[in-house]
Amino acid sequence: MNRRSGQHVAQAVLVLLVAFALMGCSAQTRPTWTYAAAGAAPAASVAPAGSTPAGVAVASAVPGSSDHAAHGTGTLAIEAFDLGFKPSALTIDAAGTYAVTFKNTGSIAHDLTFADGTKIAAEPGATASGNVNVPTAGITFICSIPGHADAGMKGAVTVAGQAATGSADDHGGPAPATNVAADPNAPKYTLYDATAPKVLDGTVHDIDLVVQEKEMTVADGFVQAVWTFDGTVPGPVIRVHLGDTVRVHLKNPITNTLSHSVDFHASQVAWNDEMTSIKPGEEKLYEWHADYAGVWMYHCGTAPALHHIANGMYGMVIVEPKGGFKTVDREFALVQSEWYLGPQGQPVDLAKASTGNPAPDYVVFNGVANQYKDNPLKVPTKGTVRLFVLDAGPNIDSSFHIVGTIFNTVIKEGIQLTPNNPGHFGSQAVDLSPAQGAIIELVTPEDGLYPIVTHAFNFVGRGALGLLQAGDGDPKN
């Protein structure tokens, strides 16, 4: 595989998609971060002018300079990709004039425009340099090419102990509806394995489902105190056959702080029986029979159920029909849901989630914004792919679509589109309201990248973006 060529193909595809979705970043006063930088040190050594160190996020004066406390010097290394900067937040020891090394690893032209008008431009694959004077108050920067800043190409240089001010951006689109600042020192998210599990052996299944209250990184820089089934958001995928008996042992450890419950949509039981809440230190048995095939939601129903679902307590059940499904090359399980950010390290904001016109900060697949953009789901070229898809909500519909493909099979809430239908009809998008599920099959026709989105493109820029990668991802080699 030609790695550079593959990256450029991926970036070009993402540019076309994200241009539809505006994802601005508001300038905010400098917060007190929940997480200290790893190996926290007062400053990092500075590369000589003209070098391009990777991932530089802290700059300081050249060691030995007698006046570095008053006049900062050194090099700021900033990389542009499609569509963002890395790093987008830099902290320096002192105000002063800094050399800037600007490397464009994207597939289209970008520039680095500071709030004072300083502009450094670079074509794809090129590196440019310049100088910028950083005042004590700090300085912001954007890519000034129309639409690029709105799609996320914004950043700031902050002097230690100060807040960045000023903006060269006069065409900002609507930012995510949040007053929560990203924490640059927040832990990296944990990748959720999207591979669909195998069907459970046997016909009677005893399953422990343990509630865990924990912190989780839901998007780069954002940590929430989530409530989970078995420590993940979404909870584990449970896959059984039609007619099986499922015995779920719900456990709420004494170390938790809240009462919780579970509601399996694949079951037929009284709400005031198995679905009642249990306190910390309690457990209960929830037994049900898989009487209908399909993709089903389960979730916590403890009041307010909206808060418990919005805070991570949901998952998928797959009930296979008699005889099971035909064999395909790859199977994935994807759950679309929303995050309404609360303060760093706290539960999600119930007031945001409760509005009649919901505006989630993030719409995601399997709990984390953009995780399958960063880590594409790999499939064989011309391979057969089956997707189990659930919209867990709690509020937003999904228009599930994979760019460059046509769904040849769709089973949505029991209604079937099959490859052998008389008119040879296909499907371009599957509409799912909260708590609806579907089984989707497709073929990836050639080497390349196939973006996974909700076709409500205002949410693609807020995290609802992934990639299927067929072969090496490059259709030209």
Image (cartoon, grey):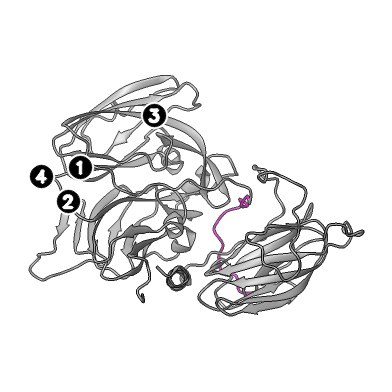
Compute the Cα span from label 3 to label 2: 30 Å
Q: Which residue is mark 3?
A: 210
Compute the Cα span from label 1 to label 4: 11 Å
Residue 358, can we see it? no
Compute the Cα span from label 1 to label 2: 12 Å
Q: Which residue is mark 4?
A: 323
Comes first in the chain, label 3 or label 2: 3
The three-letter amino acid code for the residue at tag 4 is Gly
Q: Which residue is mark 2?
A: 414
- Magenta segment, principal secondary structure? loop
* Residue 173 belongs to magenta span: yes
| Residue stretch rendered in magenta on the structure | 170-183
Q: Which residue is mark 1?
A: 319
| Mark closer to the observer (1, 4) | 4
| Dots 3, 4 in contact, CB < 8 A | no
Instruction: Describe residue 149's horizontal placement relative to residue 240 as left or right.
Output: right
Instruction: Describe residue 50's horizontal placement relative to residue 406 as left or right.
Output: right
Question: Vertically, is 263 above or below 445?
Answer: above
Label 3: which secondary element? strand
Comes first in the chain, label 3 or label 4: 3
Residue 348, can we see it? yes
The three-letter amino acid code for the residue at tag 2 is Gly
